Amino acid sequence: QVAKGLPVQCASHGLSNTLGSKEDFDKIAPNGGCSLECIALLPCGHRCPLRCHALDPEHQSMRCNVRVPFICRKGHKVFGVRSDIADLCGDNSVGQAKSCEYCEICDEIARVEKKTKQEVARIKAAEQKQLSEQALQEANEEMAIQNELALLQEACEKTEQMRVAEKRAVALEKIRRQRELEEFCRTDELERLVQEDTEKMEQELAAQERSHRRATS
């Protein structure tokens, strides 16, 4: 008689089954044993969390997932998995954690510290940005003031140049008028001298004429 599948029997539980398809392997013997829970105890004293399995029957590499109380290196009393605790006996005594990475309090403290550092870094970056923007604004205002001072200085220099030019024009006008007055005065003096010479000649001619009349009479 031909069997409908592969007859198997669990070495741990004595349960017999027939595997006729791939789905039967996944359903009946997912770990190479049977569908029942493993009844073996781990070195920590807790039951194996897997279904019946053929690999690692001595449970040398099996990790326990039962959470038990322990004290981390920073003194926090928390709950953790036995496989993550060093020097822990098979009973429920409190042991010492290998590292604080399994301590929920340490994890929360680390998370808060990280968040605080990020917030501090964000605040510092915002302050630095604000200081940079303020410095840029002050630099722009200083530049604007310098430009206004330069324009004012230029206007003052132009005003001074115009004032000097005006004074020079006034002085030149005074010189011109003085020269005109001197020229006018020289002309009057010349006419006066000519007039005096003319009058003197006329007087001499009159005197000569009178002398001639007396001589002839």
Image (tube, grey):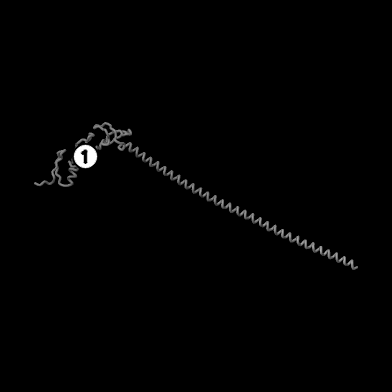
Q: Residue 1 location, x and y as percent? A: 8, 46
Res 165 → quadrant? bottom right
Which residue is found at the position 58% from the left and 52% from the top?
157
Q: Secondary structure at mark 1?
A: loop
Give above or below for 75 relative to 156: above
Q: In the image shown, does 161 or 93 lie closer to the viewer?
A: 161
Residue indicated by mark 1: 50
Q: Residue 83 location, x and y as percent? A: 26, 36
Is residue 104 found left or right of 31 in the rendered image? Answer: right
Which residue is found at the position 74% from the left and 60% from the top?
186
Q: Quadrant of the C terminus?
A: bottom right
Q: In the image shown, does 116 or 217 lie closer to the viewer?
A: 217
Is residue 44 found left or right of 10 in the rendered image? Answer: right
Q: Residue 72 location, x and y as percent? A: 31, 34
Which residue is found at the position 64% from the left and 55% from the top?
168
Which amino acid, by three-letter code, is at mark 1?
Leu
Give above or below for 110 relative to 196: above
Q: In the image shown, does 26 or 56 lie closer to the viewer?
A: 56
Res 181 → quadrant? bottom right
Is residue 70 found left or right of 52 in the rendered image? Answer: right
Q: Residue 179 location, x and y as percent? A: 70, 58
Give above or below for 85 relative to 6: above
Q: Residue furthest left?
A: 1
Q: How many marks?
A: 1
Which residue is found at the position 17% from the left and 45% from the top?
25
Give above or below for 181 relative to 71: below
